[in-house]
Amino acid sequence: MTDFSYFTLRRRATKTSPPTSVFGISCTRQMDANELLNKPPDVTRSTVQKAVVVIADSPQLFGQLREKLSAVTGAWFAQK
């Protein structure tokens, strides 16, 4: 299963700079830990979950990024 999350990180204003925001999108997948080809000893749960995250200064391209993140995350998990 693939899940997407969107978020905003805000930096407060300082004496020398105004407040700013960056925007993020993450693509998360999980798989059964028994499917791993090389299961490290620190994997103790029944599932493994990982995410690929992109941080950008504008959320305008997130539609395109969502498609690419899905492909990248899918390829990463296909390696098991």
Image (tube, rainbow, N blue to C red):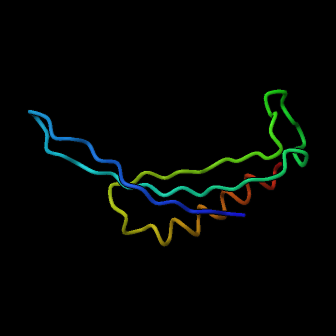
Q: Is residue 9 left or right of residue 17?
A: right
Q: Is residue 72 left or right of residue 33?
A: left
Q: Is residue 32 left or right of residue 26?
A: right
Residue at far bottom of view: 63
Q: Indicate the quadrant where residue 58 lies.
A: bottom left
Residue at far front of view: 45
Q: How many marks?
A: 0
Residue drawn at the location 80% of the way across and 56% of the way down: 78
Q: Position of residue 37 (x, y in %)?
A: 90, 43
Q: Is residue 72 left or right of residue 47?
A: left
Residue at far left of view: 15
Query: Residue 34 versus residue 62: which sits nearer the camera?
Result: 34
Q: Indicate the quadrant where residue 43 lies.
A: top right
Residue drawn at the location 59% of the way across and 65% of the way down: 68
Q: Position of residue 55 (x, y in %)?
A: 43, 51
Q: Position of residue 71 (x, y in %)?
A: 67, 64
The N terminus - image quarter: bottom right
Q: Position of residue 51 (x, y in %)?
A: 62, 50
Q: Indicate the quadrant where residue 45 lies.
A: top right
Residue drawn at the location 13% of the way across and 44% of the way down: 18
Residue drawn at the location 48% of the way across and 58% of the way down: 25
